[in-house]
Image (tube, rainbow, N blue to C red):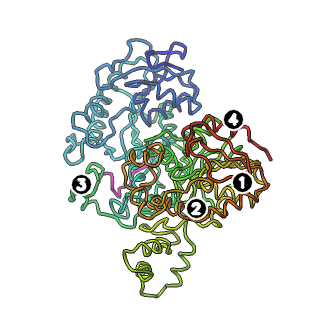
Amino acid sequence: MPSSASPLDPSAGSPDSVVFGAGGFIGRFVVAELLRRGRRVAAAVRGDADRLTSWLAGQDVPLGGLSVVRADITRSGLGLPPTGLDGVRDVYNCAARFAFGLSVAEARAANVTGALNVLDWAAGLPALRRVVHVSGYRVSADGSADGSAPDYRRLGAYEASKKEGDAAVRARARARGIPLTIANPSTAVGPGQYVGLASVVADLWHGRLPALPGGREVFVPVVDVGYLAAFMTRLPEHEETAGRAYWILDDRTPVLPDLIALLARHMGVRAPRRSVPVGLLRRLPRALTGVDPETLSFLSADRYDTAPARAFAEKAGLSQPPTETVLTTWADALVAARFGTASPATARYGYQDVAGVRTWLTGDRERPGHVLLHGLPLDAGSWTQVTARLDTPALTADLPGHGRSAIPPNPAAGQAQEERAGQRATVGQARAEQAAPGSTASRARAEQASPRVTAGRPRAGRVGARALDPSALERWMAELLGPVTTRPVLVAHSFACGPALRYAVAHPGAISRLVLVAPAFLQNPASRLLRSWAAVPLLRHLPAARLARTLGVPEGSTADLARPGRARAVVAALRAAHAQRDELRRLLERVDVPVEIVVGSADPLTTAVDVPVTTIDGAGHYPQLTHPTELATHLEAKVGSR
């Protein structure tokens, strides 16, 4: 692998292409596409290239033709090595400062001066065939031909600098006779894109999007980043594309409200029903709206002339992937990476329907050696260090209503609401009639009453107020494991030991072994506080570090509790599990598959059992987090096959 400390890798041969901004989102996909096509590429980065080369290796990109060079486009001459790049034919400028809140000087340094520096450097290449410059879809196609300077105050530094840079690059190319093609992509989406529209998706997923900015016709087009890279790398191969600009976007992108609704359905969250006009957003203070004024110019109903791009794509043999697939795959990647705050899983991941619940799955759903279910208040990510140490494929899932999975619909609540149709009493009034307001009994009964529903999905406010009943969890378990063709080891932690035990009793031929890790029904029960509804605001609003210390888990493992309904679902599950302790102990005696229990020495069983018990020295209630190697070694010896 090329080292970022080496200006050029002689073994890669003389580069025939150079990509500026190679460490950025679009740039690295362009590098990958060129390398896959057998090109010799100089990847120009400003800092350390280890992140780029690691990413390329992770994408199975052949690295034999890659050289890495350091460059600073804000400097005249770009700071490139004096020799070794004379054979470059194609120059791709993907470098830019894409951020809101930049000063004018910061934005112009990269987006205007830097773009011109790249063009001037390319003009000195003896074998130059083409410069492909990345501009933007909101930039005027005529390049501000009237010569007027863009209004930095109205547009903001980022967009104004891109407009100025677009016009300056066109003028410089004409003056120097440089063969230039401009790519005007819309929002490029794919794994690793965490800015712009991604922030709206993050707010949607976290339950922080009460209303959409703009009106019904706002059009924020996307383009698959892989398609964009393929389009750009083919431009220099066609002489007729010199001197032209192409809007590269997916015309099939839904208008913004429909786009957000699509992603909300995919992720199992509520889409906002209201919108706020752009004009009103401009007048309201940012402290109230939370909207950066620079983003408002992107909220437009404008459409773009993509006919030239479509014609070129057809000639080049390119076609855009299905829009919905692009959007939902991107949403999965955003959730997997926690919107840029964590490393995504290396195994397959994403949302799937399981028994009517949008469920987050990671791993192999057909031939796993292990199926692992998490406890509370964790999610399937708590098994990451264990599954990484297993030699066989694994499947993990976030339980319904927990982690990244959706709050399940409540059919009983829907039926109850239908029965009350036409009555004047609201759900809130019906609850109020059950007991005196403010009493402990009234709060407990109110929380157990049917949540309000809309179109079959619980509404926000009382989302997740009831634990999923055992029969519903059994159906979910059966459908989760329905596609499995092996007899895996079923591993469950804490609360999940209950549904895993029920599944083992009902489907003994489907698994080879049942491993219960820190089974809550055989240990000291959760505290009264954690089982009371008073714990809900504490779980949701305590600072992450303090909450993690209180629960004895790593800080990042409690992030989902701040999402609507999740803290309530945890408390509801704890209450339900406490009521089922005796039942589960009796079920343990009826299991017809081999069963083993694993506990930490600091968190022993409090009930004697007639099954093998393994103790991990020094571990507490979460051995998968504190002692993953010991637990994985133990589990690996228990793999079965069908």
**How far apart are the alpha carbons under marks 1 and 2?**
28 Å
The span from disc 3 to disc 1 (Cα, nearest Å) is 49 Å
Q: Residue at label 1?
A: 483
Q: Report the disc number at residue 550.
A: none
Q: Residue at x 34, y 21 (%)?
A: 121
Give the residue pinned by disc 3: 287
> Upstream in the sequence, badge 4 or badge 1?
4
Q: Which of the two discs, 2 and 3, sits closer to the camera?
A: 2
Q: Is residue 537 depicted above or below 60 in this figure?
A: below
**Residue occupying the point 39% across, 42% down:** 184
**Residue 125, image quadrant:** top left
Sequence order check: which comes first, mark 1 or mark 2? 1
Above or below for 414 versus 248? below
Could you tell me residue 92's position as x and y percent? Answer: 42, 30
Residue at horizontal 50 percent and vertical 59 percent from the top: 570
Callout 1 amino acid: Pro
Q: Which residue is mark 4?
A: 391
Residue pointed to by mark 2: 577
Q: What's drawn in magenta, residue-wise?
A: 297-308
- The answer to whether residue 304 is magenta is yes
Left or right: 154 in relation to 59: left
